[in-house]
Amino acid sequence: MENLKALAYELRENVIDMIVEGKAGHIGGDMSVMEILTEIYFDQMNISPENMDDPDRDKFIMSKGHSVEAYYAVLAKKGFFDIKDVIAEFSKFGSQFIGHPNNKLPGIEMNSGSLGHGLPVSVGMALAGKMDENDYRVYTVMGDGELAEGTVWEGAMAASHYKLDNLCAVVDRNRLQISGNTEDVMAHDDLHERFRSFGWNVIDVADGNDIDQLKTAFDSAKETKGKPTVLIANTVKGKGSSVMENKANWHHKVPNAEELEQIRKDLAAGKEAALHG
Amino acid sequence: MAKIANKQVICDVLLEAAKKDKDIVALCSDSRGSASFTPFANELPGQFVETGIAEQNLVSISAGLAKCGKKPYAVSPACFLSTRSYEQCKVDAAYSNTNVKLIGISGGVSYGALGMSHHSAQDIAAMAAVPNMRVYLPSDRLQTECLMKELIQDDKTAYIRVGRNAVDDVYEEGNVPFEMDKATFVTEGTDVAIIACGEMVKPAVDAAAILKEQGISATVVDMYCVKPLDKEAIVKAAKGAKAVITVEEHAPYGGLGSMVSQVVAGECPRKVINLALPDAPVITGTSKEVFNHYGLNAEGIAKAAAEAIK
């Protein structure tokens, strides 16, 4: 198996290229979610450009659609499109690579961007699987700030009501949103209990930027029957460079030349450590 | 034949189709009784999804089902479906291009004295403004049946608004002129054109009869397809008339009247009078009392038409 830890750093480098070239991007959340997406797409999910018409292939909804740069990097690596095209065209006039997922692009199921939609849509997809007795699984990734949207909890209610054990949600718990600390904006610190009280199997991932811990959690989710699973993945916003880590003002930011130089050095060091550390 | 509500016809058509097509799924938000969908839920429980009182979830779940090959019909009071779930209709249904049919029941002021929270007088404006969203307001049970049989066969999203109560037939059983996305000319005249949609078509036809007694010849166009709007029909009707009257169970802004006015102004300028509900919470009463109060009845339409061509 490919070294997914190193791959996550390589994909981060793609994201930086996209954001610098496109002069826009939700960089902090891209960095925090990268191991989650890498583990889902390169280890957990049965999905590829070749099997998109297979009714049994797994499904994914990027509910925190603003982290689309990370999603593009992953989909390009999977072969859905060319990363060179994404880097050259991202956010530019007339581009198909816009600032939120759009299902005119191959590999993307649904358009997202407005928060709180991914989980309810995933409920519908998982329900269809149950109705047709297909054995695919449905994955969705939400931000922690996103959990203030009421529709997340409408979806959570329905998922347990219909016993959707083929549904696995992930919360990218990086504890920062655009206005600052999530606990100051709208507290979530009883998050695990909230999901449990909605009838979910809750798995805490102590380090949500650790591929091994994520793998263990996703594998455990697959074995859980009769209820949906949510992974609360404790991540670091801006993960990969000291320039960005745990800084709310890097929610949406384009690095200047000096910052860029340091970010590239840090990401290269992270990749090196993953390969040889 | 005993009169039945348009929403009942929708259930009947869907239930028959769903018995042969397991992918047809009906979803309700604690609205199966008011939607006349209890027979569907009872006969095909495996193809019925209850979401509870959660209209946003209703539409998003429908979109997810559609993405996985199902043919979902989200059935909920028009007031909630079109405003509470507006973003889900916009993003998950229309923008994501999923085959979600949105059935808004008890539309307009069907709920009468329940007040503005339960009225959907903004739905045409809201839904028509969304790219990729079609908007249909069938006039009677017979046209509703024709429309649903067409919609079942396509794979695009649409919003269909019907009222709560049974309404008088506009058409004759076994002889319903219907072409998808083409307005129906119910009568053809030479003096005034009345363009109506939904449950305002019947009073428009009755108004034409009153006008005939006064020596005024009226065209009545049933614009059930509000979007895609049948512009050719509007131009044809307007060109053959001195004035155009629009009639709708909707707020005065952004509805059929606004849309028809745009076409008439651009293509064949004529005086256009828009008959609609007021820009205010409507007076308390049954829907019939409300219509009578605001002149949205045969007499009111006839009066407006006669004055328009003076």
Image: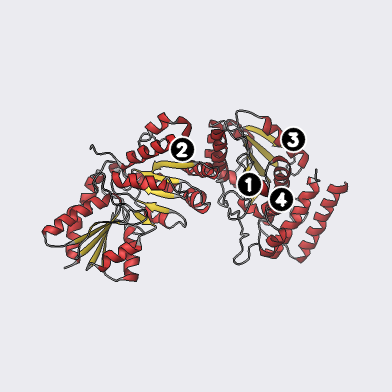
Q: Residue at x 46, y 50 (%)?
A: B157
Quadrant in which residue B74 is drawn: top left
Q: Kindly indicate whether the residue at mark 1 contacts the one at mark 3 (C-beta within 8 angstroms).
A: no
**Residue under numbered circle 3:** A216
The x and y percentages for residue B199 are 28, 49
In this picture, residue B171 sits left or right of residue A109: left
Q: Is residue B53 visible?
A: no
Amino acid type of disc 4? Lys
- According to the image, label 2 marks what residue? B21
**Is residue A16 depicted above or below B239 in this figure?**
above
Q: Nearer the viewer, mark 3 or mark 1?
A: 1
Q: Which residue is mark 1?
A: A52
Q: Which mark is residue B110?
A: none
In-front residue for pair B195/A16: B195
The mark that comes first in sequence, 3 or 1, is 1
Marks 2/4: CA distance? 35 Å
The amino acid on which the numbered mark 3 sits, given as a three-letter code, is Thr
**Quarter of the figure with the N terminus of chain A:** top right
Which one is closest to the eye, mark 3 or mark 2?
2
Crowding around mark 3 (Cα neighbors within 10 Å: few <14, some 14 to 19, many 20+) is few
Numbered mark located on residue A78 in the image: 4
Labels 2 and 4 share a subunit: no
Callouts 3 and 2 in the same chain: no
Q: Earlier in the sequence, mark 4 or mark 1?
A: 1
Label 3–label 2 contact, CB within 8 A? no
Marks 3 and 2, Cα distance to the nearest angstrom? Answer: 41 Å
Camera-side residue: B295 or B146? B146
Residue type for callout 2: Asp
